[in-house]
Amino acid sequence: MKDRTNEQWLAGLRGAGQDEAVSDLRVVLLRVLRAGLGSRRKGISDAAIEDFAQEALMKILDNLDSFRGESRFTTWAQKIAMRVAFTALRRRRWRDVSLQEILSRYEATNMETREMSDPAPPPDEAATRQVMLENVWRMISEELTERQREALVAVMLNGMPLEEAARRMDTNRNALYKLLHDARKKLKKRLIKEGISSQDVLAVFGDG
Amino acid sequence: MLDRDELNKLMRALAETREDEIGCDECLERVDLFVEMKLSGLDATEAMPLVQEHLDICGDCREEFEALLAALRTAEGSRVGWRSVFGATSRLWRRMRGGSSR
């Protein structure tokens, strides 16, 4: 495969020699996907990686005009391939997890029961912790909208990828990030208003 | 409704929360340059602090960034290749430090 400048890649992918450039770009994408997926490759077939590369190739060809030339063309293309692959892998990994199931645990679970599952602290400390947990949950309930609470529980507390939570909430990853950013800002302001810093809370609960 | 681990996760996230943060789309737009700066041995965090902050908070973007960085680091012949882009990236970095570094 020949080395190309950014301009040569763009000209090749748009021009008469498109087949050769597309074929070379596919090789570049396959290489980065195989190396980047690393240990995750267990259970991912070569056919799946070929599919990721093909889907990425289509996206890249459709979006050539958005390449701003600040990086190498291949790095720009490879980041798109990585996003395509991880999007598919997350969907596969989380396909059996329902957002409603996660949320219902928070509606149904009794706070004392959850706190008791922690190693038992001394009585005074336990009381302080209990008050803190109740206060923070109250702030979440009072400050956040229902969608913000859902996103916070799914993504920040249960580790659901933004992409997957967004899909279940009929939005997109960027919009969900911004929704959560607003939620975090609201909670941070409320804590400050109540004279509590997140560091204070972490000190009470240790680094658990 | 929360347990201790969840509260810790939440508090750590709040401690990292800034008034102005970029979203996933802006991070994706800039992450290729961010990766190249890392590969060239430049201080990407200093040059692009909003990208670094986003990667610290957003697990999805961090996962993709780390995979891309690892792949390019291990790619055959990458050392030679990255030296060749070092000059261009250095110039861009200096320009960003002098002006709109974010």
Image (spheres, helix red, strand yellow):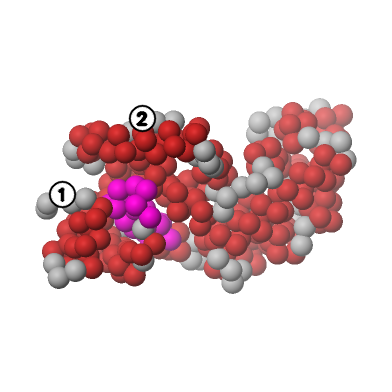
In front of the other: A46 or B27: B27
Q: Secondary structure at mark 1?
A: loop
Residue A22, percent from left and from top? 20, 64
Q: Residue at x 66, y 59 (%)?
A: A179
Label 1 Cα crowd, 10 Å radius (few <14 / some 14-19 / many 20+): few
Magenta stretch contains residue B60: no
- The reply to whether label 1 and label 2 mark residues of one chain is no
Magenta stretch contains residue A85: yes
- What secondary structure prevails in the magenta region? helix
**Start-end of magenta stretch:** A68-87
Q: Would residue A111 be seen by someone viewing this image from the given angle?
A: no
Chain where mark 2 sits: B
Q: Residue at x 63, y 57 (%)?
A: A178
Residue B7, percent from left and from top? 71, 42
Q: Looking at the picture, which amino acid does disc 1 mark?
A: Asp
Residue pointed to by mark 2: B41
Residue pointed to by mark 1: A3
Residue A129, percent from left and from top? 81, 36
CA separation in Å, label 1 and label 2: 23 Å
Q: Is residue B56 left or right of residue B72?
A: right
Q: Looking at the picture, which amino acid does disc 2 mark?
A: Gly
Label 2 Cα crowd, 10 Å radius (few <14 / some 14-19 / many 20+): few
